[in-house]
Image: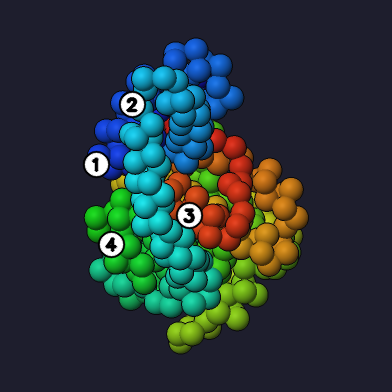
């Protein structure tokens, strides 16, 4: 879709403020023509930086030309405006440093993995996504939303999607409560580990439909879930509890279910509420995981580029601008460029 005056104005408002914005708008109204918008190589989906850079270049070039004509009084305004722009760009420079620091904080790795569930949060998730099932009078089983099995409650994690350690940064995804039921999933310990360490993500193809698992780290595909669980266990597990898990994750032919068997499986609920996680946070985790995959050499850059186009972030809420701006700042800080195509949102705030 070609550029519109409204989209251009939005980009300018995002980049400028106060007198600089007013002066620039005056020049824009005088020198930017409708034909320029229709013939531009940009469109409404391009980011604010690209649109503003294009408009600024075109408008200042024409204003400079007009200023050179006899009787013109635009030259002083243009010089003043360019000085204001340079000052604002200098003020914005620290944002790249902030984004660079965020790279070391907002990462899905072992350091930020869920060590133990918050009881109240986990019980909220259980009430939404599981039934109360007991295999013995005092031993409760809980539904794992990806393996679709009832497992001993202590081995199913109430996993925060936007990690608890980042609770002071809720404005980035636009969440008001870190313990919102939509910020969590019930996942067995191995699956939660894979999600928290960027090895597995959940995506909605095309921005709608069920959330499906996608393996980010190919090296885990052949790893049996039981084998990984035994490596991760940090609580006391009775032999009969482990036997429940082994039975659930063993096929009729005796072979064990692996991480690779979970690929393309959908998140499901066995409780009163359907799965309704924050798609924006799952999109954030997916994109951060792909960045890690490229950095760790799990995937070639061209594979990462292709996979980036498989998911969209779901809606057009104000949170989307926060997340996309955050990624653009990180990419600028790294000296890189944006990965993947433009996102086409389907549903409302999700």
Residue visible at 60% across and 57% down in the picture? 335
Location of residue 337 with respect to 1 vertically, above or below? below
- Residue 310 point in image, percent of width and height: 60, 40
In what element is the residue under mark 4? loop
- Residue 272 point in image, percent of width and height: 31, 47
| Earlier residue among tags 2 and 1 | 1
- Mark 2–mark 4 contact, CB under 8 Å? no
Label 1, label 4: how far apart the Cα atoms are? 39 Å
- The answer to whether any part of residue 253 appears in the image is yes
| Earlier residue among tags 3 and 1 | 1
Q: Would you name the residue on which mark 1 appears? A: 18
- Residue 247 point in image, percent of width and height: 59, 67
In what element is the residue under mark 1? helix
Q: Would you name the residue on which mark 4 appears? A: 179
By what rule are the colours in the image chosen?
rainbow
Q: Would you name the residue on which mark 2 appears? A: 73
| Earlier residue among tags 2 and 4 | 2
Label 2, label 1: how far apart the Cα atoms are? 21 Å
Q: Would you name the residue on which mark 3 appears? A: 329
Write down the quadrant of residue 246 in the picture.
Answer: bottom right
Q: Nearer the viewer, mark 2 or mark 1?
A: 2
Residue visible at 67% across and 46% down in the picture? 305
Residue found farthest to the top: 35
Q: Is residue 25 left or right of residue 104?
A: left
Residue 69 versus residue 211: which sits nearer the camera?
69
Label 3, label 1: how far apart the Cα atoms are? 23 Å
């Amino acid at each position: 879709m070609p550029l519109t005056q409204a989209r251009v104005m939005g980009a300018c408002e995002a980049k400028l403020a106060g007198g600089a914005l007013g002066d620039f708008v005056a020049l824009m109204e005088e020198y930017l023509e409708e034909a320029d918008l229709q013939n531009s190589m940009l469109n409404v989906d391009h980011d604010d930086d690209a649109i503003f850079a294009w408009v600024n270049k075109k408008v200042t070039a024409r204003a400079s030309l007009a200023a050179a004509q006899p009787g013109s009084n635009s030259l002083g305004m243009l010089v003043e405006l360019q000085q204001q722009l340079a000052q604002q760009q200098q003020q914005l420079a620290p944002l790249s440093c902030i984004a660079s620091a965020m790279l070391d904080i907002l990462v899905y790795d072992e350091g930020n993995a869920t060590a133990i569930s918050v009881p109240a949060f986990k019980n909220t998730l259980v009430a939404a996504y599981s039934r109360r099932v007991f295999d013995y009078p005092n031993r409760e089983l809980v539904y794992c939303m990806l393996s679709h099995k009832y497992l001993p409650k202590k081995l199913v994690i109430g996993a925060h999607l936007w990690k608890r350690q980042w609770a002071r940064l809720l404005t980035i995804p636009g969440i008001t409560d870190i313990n919102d039921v939509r910020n969590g999933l019930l996942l067995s310990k191995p699956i939660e580990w894979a999600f928290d360490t960027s090895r597995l993500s959940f995506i909605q193809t095309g921005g709608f439909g069920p959330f499906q698992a996608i393996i980010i780290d190919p090296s885990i595909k052949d790893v049996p879930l039981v084998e990984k669980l035994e490596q991760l266990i940090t609580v006391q597990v009775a032999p009969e509890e482990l036997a429940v898990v082994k039975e659930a994750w063993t096929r009729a032919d005796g072979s064990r279910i692996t991480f690779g068997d979970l690929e393309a499986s959908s998140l499901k609920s066995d409780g009163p509420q359907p799965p309704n996680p924050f798609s924006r946070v799952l999109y954030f985790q997916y994109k951060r995981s792909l960045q890690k995959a490229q950095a760790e050499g799990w995937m070639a850059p061209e594979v990462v580029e292709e996979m980036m186009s498989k998911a969209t972030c779901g809606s057009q809420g104000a949170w989307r601008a926060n997340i996309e701006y955050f990624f653009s700042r990180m990419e600028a800080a790294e000296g890189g460029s944006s990965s993947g195509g433009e996102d086409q949102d389907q549903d409302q705030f999700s």
